[in-house]
Amino acid sequence: MRGMTFNKNIGMILLAVYLILVGLIALTGLPFGILPAVVALVAGIFILIGR
């Protein structure tokens, strides 16, 4: 059960990082390349594993 909590927490943390990156890209116009897509994919996987 503890492993599921870790996976769900890491997924939510990665989701928060993704949202911050997207916000920074929108506000500054800086190109972050493929990084937001990778973070979103990993966050989604961890959130699904945690369920």
Image (cartoon, rainbow, N blue to C red):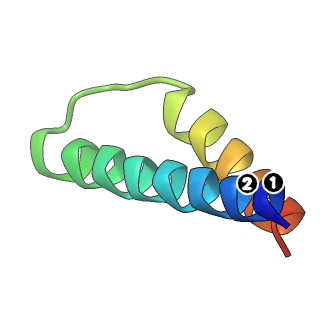
15 on left or right of 29: right
**Of marks 2 and 1, the one in the foreground:** 1
| Label 2, label 1: how far apart the Cα atoms are | 6 Å
Q: Nearer the viewer, residue 45 or 3?
A: 3
Q: Secondary structure at mark 1?
A: helix
Residue 45: % across, % down: 81, 53
50 on left or right of 40: right
Q: Residues within 10 Å of mark 2 (few under 14, many from 20)?
A: some
Residue 28 placement: quadrant: top left
Q: Nearer the viewer, residue 1 or 11?
A: 1
Q: Contact (CB < 8 A) between labels 2 and 1?
A: yes
Q: Secondary structure at mark 2?
A: helix
> Which residue appears at 71% of the width and 43% of the height?
42
Residue 17: % across, % down: 39, 47
Residue 48: % across, % down: 84, 66
Q: Nearer the viewer, residue 2 or 46?
A: 2
Residue 11: % across, % down: 63, 56
Q: Nearer the viewer, residue 20 or 3?
A: 3
46 on left or right of 18: right
Q: Residue 19: in sight, yes or no?
A: yes
Specify the amino acid type for callout 2. Asn
Query: Residue at the left extreme?
Result: 28
> Which residue appears at 76% of the width and 53% of the height?
46
Query: Residue at the bottom extreme?
Result: 51
Residue at the disc numbered 1: 3
> Which residue appears at 40% of the width and 58% of the height?
16
Residue at the disc numbered 2: 7
Quadrant into which the N terminus falls = bottom right
Specify the amino acid type for callout 1. Gly
